[in-house]
Amino acid sequence: MNHPDSPDDRLPPVASFQAYLEQLHQKYQPLNHGKVADYIPELAKASPDWFGICVATTDGRIFEVGDSDRIFTIQSISKVFVQGLALEDHGRSFLLSKVGVEPTGDAFNAIVLDEQSKRPYNPMVNAGAIATTSHIKGDSHTDRLNRMLDMFRRYIGHDVAVDISTFVSERTTGSRNRAMAYLMNNFGMIDFRVEEALDLYFQQCSLMVNCRDLAVMAATLANYGVNPLTGDRAVAACYIRDLLSVMYTCGMYNFAGEWAYTIGLPAKSGVSGGIIVVVPNQMGIAVFSPPLDARGNSVRGGKVCEAISADFGLHLFDSSLGCRTFLEKLQ
Ligand code: GLU
């Protein structure tokens, strides 16, 4: 029987994947919905026209189009990777005692903790991310920052740095994050000096990346923690399931449920306009385009991810297409 939603059998040929991405880029470049974030003044300097797409496969191939080399700050996408470092430092049960894994329908910067446990809801909202960051081990702030930068370097495959202007911009306008951090300190969810935790959080958000870096980071997660270009392990394989399941349920702000339902892949977005998507075992997808929708997700980014997922049958639970993997078709 033919159902109205049964998937189209004619998938595009993956051999011309570069041409496919160029078509997608051309199709969505004219889309001019959304608004560049301006609550952090440095972010407001971004052009609404910037638009890059990059796909990195777990066997080390890169496909890129548009502004894939343009540098921007990683923002909330950093939260996934710092969660991995905190898990390596303390293990699952300690971290779970400090930060939950429940999705929340509230905005990413809501000042809200779980009523009973007093934990922030999950590591992808600001409160949970600040608490997670506060648990990174190290002898001093510099040591903790260096451990974090070293972790990002393993995912990306080259040296990384923090954008000082964005860091200062976040720090001077971050009253809301500061209020959350002090509230959590009151409930014992933050482990060391609050201002230091905040600075470290603002520094991780101000990490400079481009779309290609993000795709390689996502491909490293897809490759169970090993960077497919360098062969370096970035995170213990046993924690990939933690990171991907939290991305899947909480990664796209208060659109996470609909994203999981329609696109069906773990993803994380940030207010500077980046989105990463992980296709386990196969590839990492990254899109960069600063105009955001009302929930804080890149408008063009959402369209591109939706198209790639639908066109290649990548929804994790799409049984009819499950056997037709991307890599098998790539020549
Ligand atoms: N640094 C930003 C903040 O704390 C990150 C927000 C985001 O990308 O969602 O507000």
Image (spheres, rainbow, N blue to C red):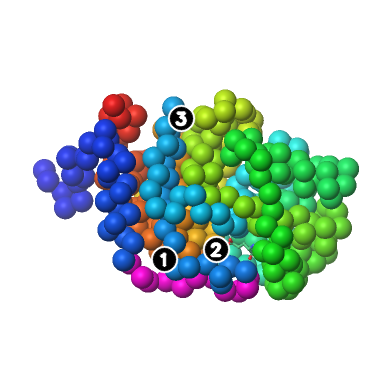
Q: Secondary structure at mark 1?
A: loop
Q: Secondary structure at mark 2?
A: loop
Q: CA distance from mark 2 to mark 1?
A: 15 Å
Residue 317: give x, y in percent of width and height.
35, 41
- Judged left or right of residue 242, residue 261 is left
Which of marks 3 and 2 precedes in the sequence?
A: 3
Cβ at disc 2 under 8 Å from ligand 1: yes
Graded by Cα atoms within 10 Å as few (under 14), some (14 to 19) or many (20 or more), the crowding at tag 1 reads: some
Q: Which amino acid type is marked by label 1? A: Asp
Q: Which residue is mark 2?
A: 271
Which of marks 1 and 2 precedes in the sequence?
A: 1
Q: Which amino acid type is marked by label 3? A: Gly
**Which numbered marker is on residue 60?**
3
The residue at the point 49 percent across, 44 percent down is 212
Q: Which amino acid type is marked by label 2? A: Val
Residue 120 visible here: no
Q: CA distance from mark 3 to mark 1?
A: 29 Å
Which of marks 1 and 3 precedes in the sequence?
A: 1
Residue 53: give x, y in percent of width and height.
41, 50
Residue 296: give x, y in percent of width and height.
50, 66
Splitting the image into 4 quarters, where does residue 44 fall? bottom right
Splitting the image into 4 quarters, where does residue 157 fall? top right
The magenta span reads 31-41
Pick the quarter of the image with the N terminus: top left
Pick the quarter of the image with the C terminus: top left
